[in-house]
Image (cartoon, rainbow, N blue to C red):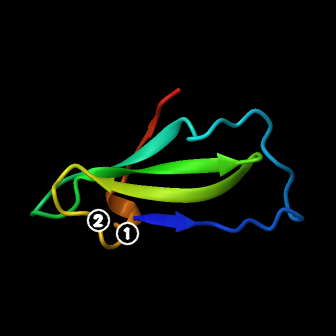
Amino acid sequence: MTRELKVDRAQVPPAPGVSSPIPGEAEIPAGGGNYGGGIIAFAKDGYLSSLEAYAHDVEPIRSWPPMDVLIFRSRG
């Protein structure tokens, strides 16, 4: 599942040197047959541009998990 984001570029300057995907992600823990996967953030021209949720299971993620279940990790 992908969500495109619109950032008001007049409100903040771009983040210099940000690569895409952003070097960090949120793990979606598996439990009770729900979720099990992650969320990756993407940037374009120094601004957050989209979020993608992926599943480790055969079933795709159909709704965004609550924030309090996510485990945030840095990949860089």
Depicted 67 relative to depicted 71: above or below: below
Q: Report x, y in % for residue 70.
A: 36, 54
Q: Are marks 2 and 1 in contact (CB under 8 Å)?
A: yes
Q: How many marks?
A: 2
Query: Which quarter of the figure is the N terminus placed in?
Result: bottom left
Whether residue 28 can be seen here? no
Residue beneath disc 1 = 64
Query: Is 1 left or right of 18, judged from the image as shown?
Result: left
Which image quarter: residue 17? top right
- Relative to 47, is 24 on the left or the right? left
Disc 2 from disc 1: Cα separation: 7 Å
In this view, which residue lies farthest toward the top? 76
Q: Name the residue type under label 2.
A: Ile
Q: Nearer the viewer, mark 2 or mark 1?
A: 2
Dot 1: what SS? Answer: loop
Residue 67: name its quadrant.
Answer: bottom left
Observer-nearest of 69 and 13: 13
Q: Which amino acid, mark 1? A: Trp
Q: Is residue 2 left or right of residue 49?
A: left
Q: Secondary structure at mark 2?
A: loop
Which percent across, then down, holds residue 74?
48, 34
Q: Give residue 75's mark.
A: none
The answer to whether 31 appears left or right of 50 in the picture is left
- Residue at the image position 10 percent from the left and 63 percent from the top: 33
Can see residue 65?
yes
Among the 4 quarters of the image, the one containing residue 63: bottom left
From what the image shows, is residue 3 above or below residue 48? Answer: below
Q: Which mark is residue 61?
A: 2
